Each structure stands twice: as structure tokens, then as C-alpha cells.
Amino acid sequence: MQLTKFGHACVRVESAGHRLVIDPGGLTDPRALDGADAVLITHEHFDHYSADTLRQALQQNPRLHVWTNTAVGADLADLGARVTVVGEGEVFTAAGLEVRVHGTWHAVIHPDIPRVPNIGFLVGGALFHPGDALTVPDTAVDTLLLPVHGPWSTTGQLIDYVREVAPRQVVGVHDGALNDVGGAMVGGLLGGNGPGTGSPYVRLAPGASADVG
């Protein structure tokens, strides 16, 4: 599989001529969806889910299908069979790849802020996108897409999370609000300037790709 990073939390996975896109939200260039066969949405927040962009892509591409959680599924209910709602423990095939669902809830931002549903996707038995949560799959992970910046975590928590998941490699996502200084600071702590995670870390530039699996 080939992984390509797009804006913020969005990535595209290509395998055997198929394209799968995860979390093309409001901070992502809509062209990330060009030629896609499937879209996975982890949760409803604007930086992961753009209803207008997704509806336009579905209108332009009759083969495109969406898998997502209950909240986003309800928002897209008028699209009928083109949207499938999935949850923790379910397994399905999207763009020719096996996808397993892990997790249920968004990470806690503050006790006074209600949590929203959030599911993570393990794609092709190798690539895990947790959305906005630090969910640990009950299986080996080759490549972990790590949400490196958000109002609900610290870099220390991320270090411990990577250690627990123990992937072969880590690719930073959810970094749209980080400037270059912040990105270098977080990357250093997750890499050679930190206490060690046991997994190499890379932050891809938008449009850059890496091999997975």
C-alpha cells in the first residue's frame, strides 16, 4: 500500500489500483477525493468531516462509498445505501482492502465538553488511523497515524501511546494547527530528542507519500 498525506488529518491509501481516503475534512484540499473508491470518516468534527465536500464528491463519482460512525451516518442518511454505518469490532472491505473498526469515543477534551462518537480504522491489517482518540488495537500495527496536536492530548501521552501500540513506524497527522516550530518540537520529542518510543517517527509534507505494510 502507498500512503499519501493530505491536509491535517486526511490521508489517501492506494493499493492495486484502488484509492481509499480517510477523514477529508474542512482543512483538506477537496482534490484528495479525486478518483477515490471509498471514504472512511472517524467522527463529525469539521477538521475530519466536511459534508459539502463529501456530498459533492459522491455526486461526481457514482462508485464512491462512505463508511462512518452513527453520528455522521445520521447526517448523511438521505444518501441511503451509499453510506454504511459501522462500529467497534466490525470488519468490512473498502477499495479492495480489509478494514477493521476499533474504538468508540473521542478523547476527552474537558469534562464540561460532551464527547462525540469516534471510531478508528485498521486498513489492510497494517495502517491504523485512530481519529481523535488514543485507541490501542488488539492486533499488531505496521504504521500508526499519530494525531500529534490537539486540545485533548500532551506530547507525553503520545509517547506512551506509541510505546503501547508498538508500530513499525509512526506517521504524524492532525497537525494542521502546528507551525514549523511546533512541528519540529513535537517531532523531536517523538524522535531522537525524546525519551524514546521504540518506533521511528516521520512527519510527511502535504502531498508526500510513504510505503505501508
Image (spheres, rainbow, N blue to C red):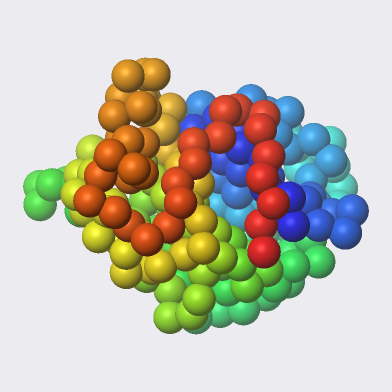
User: Residue 80 at what x, y percent from top left?
Assistant: 70, 59
Nearer to the camera, 154 or 130: 154
Disc tally is 0
- Seen at 81% across and 57% down, the residue is 15
User: Residue 38 at what x, y percent from top left?
Assistant: 74, 54
User: Residue 100 at what x, y percent from top left?
Assistant: 58, 73
Nearer to the camera, 89 or 127: 127
Image quadrant in which you'd find residue 152:
top left
Q: Residue furthest front?
A: 192
Check the picture and name the quadrant holding the C terminus.
bottom right
- Seen at 70% across and 72% down, the residue is 98
Q: Is residue 188 visible?
A: yes
Q: Is residue 49 visible?
A: no
- Seen at 13% across and 47% down, the residue is 110
* Relative height, residue 173 to residue 206 (above, below): below
User: Residue 18 at what x, y percent from top left?
Assistant: 84, 54
Check the picture and name the quadrant holding the N terminus.
bottom right
- Seen at 55% across and 45% down, the residue is 23
* Relative height, residue 2 to residue 55 (above, below): below
Nearer to the camera, 9 or 188: 188
Nearer to the camera, 19 or 183: 183
Q: Could you tell whether 147 is left or right of 89 in the image?
A: left
Q: Could you tell whether 36 is left or right of 167 in the image?
A: right
